[in-house]
Amino acid sequence: MKHIYRILPALLIVLAACNKKEVAELDFNVSVDKTTYKAGDTVKFQISGNPELLTFYSGEKGLQYENRERTAADGTPELNFTSFMQFGTQTNTLKLLVSSDFSGTYTAAAIAAATWTDITSKAVLSTGTDNTPSGVIDLSAYKSDKPIFLAFSFTGSTASTQRTWTIKNFAISNVLPDKSRVTVTGIADAGWVSVNLNNSPRAWAITSAQLQFQGGAAGIGNNSGYVITKPLFLSKVAPDRGVALKNMSTRITTYQYIYKEKGDFKPTFVASNTNVYESKTTVKQLDITVNNP
C-alpha cells in the first residue's frame, strides 16, 4: 500500500505535465453588420473569442489568403532598364544577351560553352542621352521551369576612343493576369558578376545603382567583357502575407479596415493557439462587395 501512495503523486505530476502540452481549444468567430460597402467606407469586423494569434488577409491583390504559399505564377516577365552611351564613335559595342544553359560558373570558358541569344534589338539604347529608357522587353519566350541568365557584353577596339556604357534602373517584373506586378529582380539584387575576356584591360564596374564599362582612350588595348546575373526564375512571385493583428499578450474584439477600390473581396482571419508541442488553427472567411463611392 505504501508503494501505491508513493506512485500516485508521481503519476499526478506526469499527468499535469502532459496537460500543459495541450493547446486550448479555439473559440473564435468574426462577423460584419453588412456585406456591401462603398470604396472609402470603414468595414468594422466584430471578433469573438480570444485566440492567442490572429492574422488578417484583406483579399486585395498581394493580400490574399489563397496565395499565402504561392512562389510561382504564370505571367508576363518584363525587363526594363536605362542606358547612357558616352565618348567615341565605335558601333555595336554593347549587347544584351540571354542564356538558359549557362552553367553558372562565371569564367570565360563557361561563357563560351553556353548558348547566348542576342536580344539587343528588343531594347532602345542610348545614342548619347543619359537614362534612355529601353522600353518594355518581353521575356516570355525564355520562360520555363529552368532559370535564365541575362548579360550585357562590351567590346571595344584599341584603334580609337572606346565607348563608356552605363546601365541603370534594371528591373524584371512578372506581370500577372490580374495586372498586378511582382518584382523578379532589381539591379541591386540581380547578383551581377563581371567576367573579363581575352585579357581585357578594363572590366565592368558594379554598384547597387548601376553597371558601367569605361572603354578608355585609343591605344589602351582591346576590351571585351561580360556582366552576368545570378540565375533568374521568371515566374517567381512572393507569397502573399497577412497582417498580424494580435499576439498572446493582446486582446482584440473589433478590427476596422478601409477598402479603397471597388471589387469583390474575401477577407480572411486566421486564428491559432500554439505551443512548442502542437498548434490548432481556425480560418474564417467572409465575402464583401465594394462599390464605387
Image: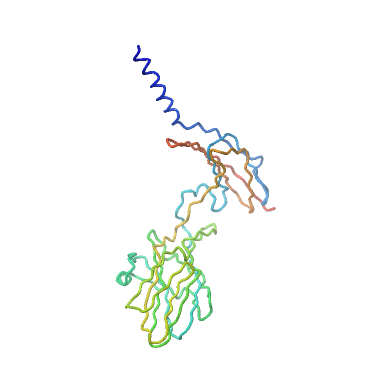
Q: Position of residue 113 (x, y in %)?
A: 30, 70
Q: Which quadrant of the structure image shows residue 148?
A: bottom left
From the viewer's perspective, is 113 left or right of 28?
Answer: left
Q: Position of residue 27 (x, y in %)?
A: 55, 32
Residue at (47% x, 83% y) in the render: 87
Q: Which quadrant of the structure image shows residue 48?
A: top right
From the viewer's perspective, is 5 left or right of 130?
Answer: left
Residue at (41% x, 21% y) in the render: 12
Q: Position of residue 56 (x, y in %)?
A: 56, 45
Q: Position of residue 25 (x, y in %)?
A: 50, 31
Return the residue nearer the eye: 291 or 79.
79
Q: Which quadrant of the structure image shows residue 7?
A: top left
Asked if residue 7 is positioned above or below residue 253 in the image, the reply reads above
Residue at (46% x, 49% y) in the render: 69
Colour setup of the view = rainbow
Asked if residue 55 is positioned above or below residue 174 in the image, the reply reads above
Asked if residue 204 is positioned above or below residue 286 in the image, the reply reads below
From the viewer's perspective, is 165 left or right of 50?
Answer: left
